[in-house]
Image: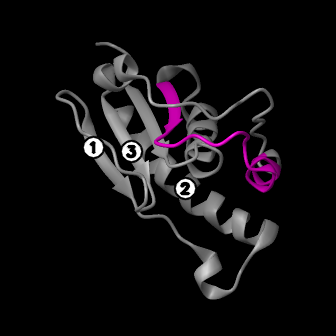
């Protein structure tokens, strides 16, 4: 059996998809091939996203937003979009899922508190996916 693979996608690849990839690497270790990318990559990882991940032992130092690599996309087992803004053309092969993540800013919660809530929502979903992939 081959190692399962996951590509996390958001628009800028600076926040949610980077969070998901970092959390998946922590949860699954080297048992899952993990990638992240953006449909319109930004220029840097969101500092508050990175800070909230450091609080739970995930270090994004050295990570940079990147575009979707068509070759990586085509060979993934799962492609997961985070939020409703990232749109990509599906290719045959991967299973596509959308995680419509919590958006605390809609409730007036911003800053590091917002990122912690987003992180915790994504972490719970990553834990569920890790359990599914380890079957």
Residue occupied by mark 3: 80
Of callouts 3 and 2, the N-terminal one = 3
**Does the residue at mark 3 contact the one at mark 1 (Cβ under 8 Å)?**
yes
Q: Quadrant of residue 89?
A: top left
Marks 1 and 2, how far apart in space? Answer: 16 Å
At 42% from the left and 52% from the top, the residue drawn is 86
SS assignment at label 2: helix
Residue occupied by mark 2: 122
At 71% from the left and 70% from the top, the residue drawn is 114
Q: Tell me if residue 97 is in the magenta stretch.
A: no
Q: Quadrant of residue 59?
A: top right
For the magenta stretch, what is the residue range? 33-53
Disc number at residue 75?
none
Disc number at residue 96?
1
Is 118 situated left or right of 127 in this image? right
Quick one: quadrant of the C terminus?
top left
């Amino acid at each position: 059996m081959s190692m399962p693979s996951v590509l996390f996608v958001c628009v800028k690849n600076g926040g949610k998809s980077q969070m998901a990839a970092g959390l998946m690497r922590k949860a699954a270790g080297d048992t899952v091939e993990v990638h992240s990318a953006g449909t319109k990559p930004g220029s840097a990882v969101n500092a508050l996203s990175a800070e909230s991940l450091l609080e739970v032992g995930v270090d994004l130092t050295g990570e940079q937003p990147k575009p979707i690599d068509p070759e990586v996309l085509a060979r993934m087992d799962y492609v997961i979009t985070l939020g409703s803004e990232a749109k990509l053309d599906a290719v045959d092969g991967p299973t596509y899922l959308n995680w419509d993540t919590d958006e605390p800013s809609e409730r007036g919660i911003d800053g590091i508190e917002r990122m912690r809530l987003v992180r915790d929502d994504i972490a719970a979903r990553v834990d569920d996916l890790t359990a599914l992939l380890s079957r």
